Image (tube, rainbow, N blue to C red):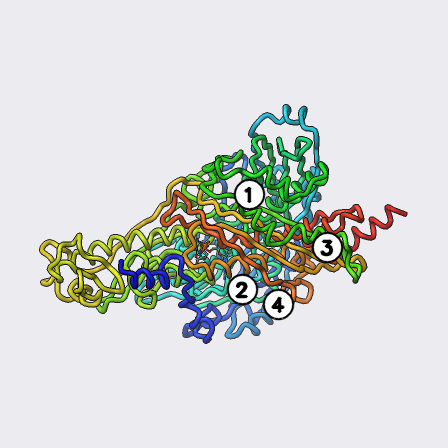
Amino acid sequence: MTAGEIAKNREQGIGASVRRKEDARYLEGKGEYLADLQVPGMAEVAFLRSPVAHAHIRAIEIPEQYRDQVFVAADLAFAAPIVAVSAAKGFKRSEYHPLTGDKARFVGDLIAICIAPTRAEAEDIAAACIVHFDEIAAIWDIDVALKPDAPRVHEHWSDNIYVESKIQTGDLDDVRKNAAVKVHKTLRMGRHAGVSMEGRGVLAHYDRRLDELVVYSSTQFPHVIRTIMAECLGISESKLRVIAPDVGGGFGPKNNFQPEELAIAALSMKLNRPLRWVEDRREHLIASPHAREHRYDLMAYADSKGRILGLEAEVVVDAGAYSVWPWTAGMEAGMSAGIMTGPYDIRVYHARAVSVATNKSPLGPYRGVGRSGACFAIETLVDAVARAVNREPMDVRMENMVPPEAMPYSSATHKLYDSGDYPQCALQARRAIDLEGVRERQQRGEPDGRLIGVGMASYTEQSAHGTAEWVARGLPVVFGYEPALARFTPDGKLILFVGIQNHGQGLETTLAQVAHQELGIAVDDVIVRHGDSSVSPYGMGTFASRSMTMSGGAVSAACVILADKIARIGAHLLQAPKEMVRLADGKVHFGEQSVGFRDIAQAAFLHPERLPVGEDPALEANAVYQPGRSTGAFSYATHACTVAVDPGTGQVEILDYVVCHDCGTMVNPMIVEAQVVGGVAQGLGTALYEEIPYDENGQPLASTFLDYTIPGFTEVPDVRVLHMETPSPHTRFGIKGMGEGGAIAPPAVVVNAINDALRPLGVEINETPATPDRVLERIVAAKGDRR
Ligand code: MCN
């Protein structure tokens, strides 16, 4: 490359902070979301949802005038239920029907579909129907569920446990005997929702010309939805087209096959009528798959310096009423226990992970799946160990970390940490938060009487999980690869057809940057098409921080094939030896001469007679990418924050927040930074604000934004982001995923900072969200204890 070309590549290729191509569409209101779609003759749907948590359904009274507008379970009996079963030993299956006919298992469970020309009319019809219930005691909490005589959420089960798994690495007895310090901790992480800007939604209609069912869904994985939906409907996948239009945020809750999707598709097929359902905010809060609700019982065994010799953990997760497809109800607890040792070199680790069925909305994936809880557990425990040995938590933290020279490192749970320098990352965060300065400030005290605290938390972010990881989890689908089809148009532009689903991550830009890197084509000349099962190759979708690594790898592989062909054709047109040409700036160069991609594409598509002898016409390539070393690429980070706690109100203000992270080679540092900040904002929601508590009747107590608080501009601080870049040895370009990372550490780091602030009072908070009420309760308890 010439100096000019290298400079150009820096502006557009891997490592360039290119502005997002897709933003013009979003910002100028040109996006097309589910609620924007119209199909002639379409009826709107309102679901009749259960108002009670746990009850047998005795009868449903439908007013005479609405008989042909209300549909119940028996009407959709031809559709098979959604059954998400893990291969884990003893896993109990739940049947999630498109409409429930026998029993309501949570407030929000689907009982009937009401259709009308408008949503308002459909809602009126739903309100006019009367469901006769025989109520059963609600299983509204883990403890209630685990009582031996508790009613069963699923009648035929022997208890209310979906699955229980164990990890036993190393000799715990030995550690128990020899540890100088033992630290016990119990923790709770609250239950909350995904609250994407756009809720879920489904539109289904029959395309008579093509004889296929067309389903639009605000989903993160349209191809995978097609597979399971076809199975449930008993039709061929070749007769089903699933399209994800613009998706206004997913964050995990749109990464499941939902009963609403099945119900709308099934009824539309049965009635041969276009139907649409658009989730409202209340439905989202009570009936969208929920996040978190973990409990931890932990015991650390350490030496007198705080070096952790062994860890014992029990993770119990409230997985709600049904097992979500494909992740299963065992996902959160299993993932949390599986990644608990995080960045630490802990060789003795015993864990028990339990997933419990309750009368709550099913638990599904949410940004930072499992890892947010694991980080909360291990990182608050590390702070507790530091307090027990009277050392600065940061020193204990760094002392326990996997050192860079141990990379690649196989963890106690057999995760292969591929590369990185965890202590260096922690050190950078420590410097940036000015730990020593905060300690001095604490000594001085605050003029307003608030208590200052500083907290840190480190984690590893398993991303782009490979085939072996998914196989080990025993899921119904193994997501270890991604395809791409790269196709030139005869005028020399490139269209990338990919199987992922961009819903805010900037992938339409970053995949174009990968194409630029391989082909030297301008990012503006590349279009990324995704989200339509009839258009792009079968792919797995966007979740698990996988798209940049997987789809980026596939785009690269397809473009490498194209680059070779372009070089061959270009060399032929320039009458030059192929080895002496190079691709840059949308042209093939040979010395001072060049031929543009447009001319090459014209030859390939319109004038095959100009091609070298034996060269196939057309200019497109298919590739599938499957990265090596299959537990995935491990990003990592340390978050640090300073808080001020008002001892009079329990109010917590975040004064400073720093993230030092490493996601291998960054494709677009500006987007990476925004992803980190967005993740932190969500993590602060988990840490301080967001919660859906349930009462003893199984009623969700937060069902509007009046009682469900999310962090806004005034709550999210200016997050300072520091980057390290240690490429992964196992992925194309050394990329690691990072889309979830920002959301993983905030609960741990904020609670550590609050507890640091509360230390003079001798109390701790061990629960999220750490609301003012809860913090104040601890402060008041401390005062009471002292009296
Ligand atoms: N990136 C990069 N260099 C890297 C890694 C990532 O430049 N080494 C950039 C890329 O621009 C990529 C983005 O960061 O587009 C995220 O990449 P990746 O980590 O591969 O994650 P995915 O694209 O697979 O996105 C999924 C991830 C998850 S799991 C959740 S949940 C989440 C998240 O992304 N949901 C989001 N970020 C979100 N952001 C928005 N706006 N909306 C959501 O719903």
N-terminal-most mark, 1 or 3: 1
The residue nearer to you, when weighing 519 against 248, is 519
Residue at image mark 1: 423
* Amino acid type at image mark 1: Pro
Q: Nearer the viewer, mark 1 or mark 3?
A: 3
Q: Quadrant of the N terminus?
A: bottom left
Residue at x 80% of width, y 49% of height: 761
C-alpha gap between disc 3 and disc 4: 27 Å
Indicate whether 152 appears above or below 78.
above
Residue 441, numbered circle: 3
Residue at image mark 4: 713
Q: Quarter-wise, where is residue 687 in the image?
A: bottom right
Residue 331, numbered circle: none
231 relative position to 166: left or right: left
Mark 2: give few (<14), some (14-19) or many (20+) Cα within 10 Å: many
- Disc 1 residue lies near ligand 1 with CB under 8 A: no
Q: Are marks 2 and 3 in contact (CB under 8 Å)?
A: no
Q: Secondary structure at mark 2?
A: loop
Residue at image mark 2: 199
Q: Nearer the viewer, mark 4 or mark 2?
A: 4
